[in-house]
Amino acid sequence: MKAKDAPGSKREVSYGENRSFRGLEDFAIRRRLRPAQQMLKELSHQNPAKNFEVLELGCGFLGRNLTQLSKDYANIRFTGVDLSVSKDVSGIQLIEDDISTWKPSHEYDAVLSLAVVEHLSNPQGHFDLIATCLKDDGLAGLTTPGPQAHLALDVLSRLGVFDRSEILDHKLYLTERGTRLLAKNSGLLVQEFRTFSLGMNQWILLRNS
């Protein structure tokens, strides 16, 4: 893990609540959804007759990722949790709660955490929550920028390509070693670790150990 200086204030709104996305930022959001799409494709193909439940931690105000995924998977029920969520989204379930304290009522076949953990002051607690939410045979997919992305994100946010407040809200950047340690401490196994977007982003596939 690599921590950096960051504002100590706690965020009060969900991603996408006060603005829309465009340009390179919109592309980056769609790009980090691809490995999650592949994970769900493989999960669905393994058991096509089964109705799956998928949870996204930190889904954003509109549950944008889940809305996109729901178009491709009729046999999957999608649920998202975030600080504030829209009441006008159909086809998915959105729960308004703080993922730092929220407790699931049941386990899920798959859990997603896309560009979330870098915003949290307690990454171990987040991995613990993923483990708590996941069924014994379930899969979890997590994306987070690597340490080498810090400088590029800082420059791009200063240029207005990415939202400056979102980048300043990053509390840490996980290394592969740090990721594997957090997973192990939570009883999770890193099944796959790879980088994408020119090495700036990381995809981690997790399962119960």
Image (cartoon, rainbow, N blue to C red):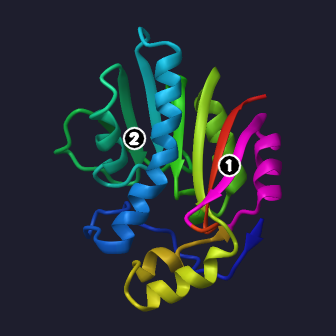
Direction top: furthest residue = 49
Q: Residue 185 magenta-drawn?
A: yes
Relative height, residue 46 to residue 190 (above, below): above
Residue type, label 2:
Gly
Check the picture and name the quadrant holding the N terminus.
bottom right
Residue 13 seen by the camera: no
Category of crowding for the residue at label 2, using alpha-carbon neighbours closer than 10 angstroms: few (below 14), some (14–19), many (at least 20): many
Q: Residue at x 67, y 69 (%)?
A: 172
Does residue 173 appear to the left or right of 198 in the view shown? right
Which segment did they paint magenta? 173-197
Left or right placement of residue 150 versus residue 28 in this view: right
The picture places residue 159, in percent across and down from the top left corner, at 41, 91
Residue tagged 1: 125
Front residue of 175 and 172: 175
Q: Report whether 122 appears left or right of 72.
A: right
Question: Helix, strand, or loop for circle 2?
Answer: strand
Q: Amino acid at mark 1?
A: Gly
Asked whether the viewer can see residue 126, the reply is yes
- Say if mark 2 contacts mark 1, CB within 8 Å: no
**Disc 2 target residue:** 80
2 or 1: tag closer to the N-terminus? 2
Mark count = 2
The percent coordinates of residue 58 (x first, y second) are 46, 51
Report the residue at 30% width, 50% height from top: 85
The quadrant the C terminus occupies is: top right
Give percent across and percent down for residue 174.
71, 63
The picture quadrant where one finds residue 144 is: bottom right
Which residue is at a point 83% across and 50% down the rendered structure image? 181
Tag shown at residue 92: none
Q: Label 2 to label 1, Cα distance in Å?
A: 18 Å
Q: Is residue 45 above or below residue 97?
A: above
